[in-house]
Image (cartoon, rainbow, N blue to C red):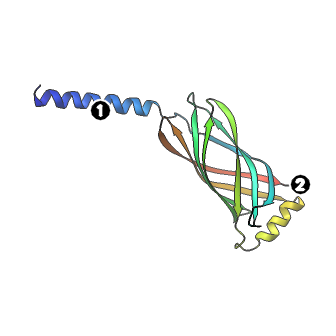
Amino acid sequence: MNLINRKIIFCILTIVLLSSVFSCAPKDPVVFKGVKNIIVDMDNGGKPVLKGDVYFYNPNKLKMKLKTVDVILLVDGTKSAEVKQDLNVLIPAQSDFSVPITAQLALKEGGLLNTVLGLIGGKKYEVTFTGYIRVGVHGIKIKVPVSQKQEIKLR
């Protein structure tokens, strides 16, 4: 086989391979729907943590795996907690799903103790979630941005 034929075959194989890889990628991003069942608890070291269930929707026809959650929580504009979790959760195709998360509270930020006490006392707060989640589809990891505001009141 001469050099020109090898280059043509290589180009065709490269195009076919890239087409098959990108056709497996999700068409639409996973949608962040909100957080429910929020509680303030203590971890093993006695530090306060925020626990809850995060709800998402997968609009794609492909099932995926949730690999990473990396989100900052702002309570009334002040950084109050951070979620950094590595996961391996199966995401069903075209359906809602939830993931339990644990957020480390940022006690060094000013006024956070009042915020935590207010959350426990039932005061309403505007909570902003910013960051990203990372999903895996057929071995390919995709970063999905998260930006959501939600009014939260704990009982």
Lower position in the chain sequence, tag 2 or tag 1: 1
Q: Eyeballing the image, is 145 above or below 21?
A: below
In the rendered structure, find residue 14 and report the number of the disc placed on it: 1
Q: Position of residue 22 (x, y in %)?
A: 42, 34
Q: Quadrant of the N terminus?
A: top left
Tell me the quarter of the picture where residue 29 sits: top right
Secondary structure state at the residue bearing disc 2: loop
Inspect the image, locate mark 2, and give the three-letter code of the amino acid beneath it.
Arg
Q: Position of residue 151 (x, y in %)?
A: 78, 53
Q: CA distance from mark 2 to mark 1?
A: 57 Å
Inspect the image, locate mark 1, and give the three-letter code of the amino acid beneath it.
Thr
In the rendered structure, find residue 114 and report the number of the disc placed on it: none
| Residue closest to the eye, 92 or 28 | 92
Q: Position of residue 78 (x, y in %)?
A: 70, 66
Dot 1: within a 10 Å radius of its alpha carbon, few (fewer than 14), some, or many (20 or more) residues? Answer: few
Q: Eyeballing the image, is 15 above or below 42?
A: above
| Residue closest to the eye, 83 or 128 | 83
| Residue closest to the eye, 77 or 36 | 36
Q: Eyeballing the image, is 107 above or below 154?
A: below
Left or right: residue 14 versus residue 82 is: left
Q: Which residue is mark 2?
A: 155
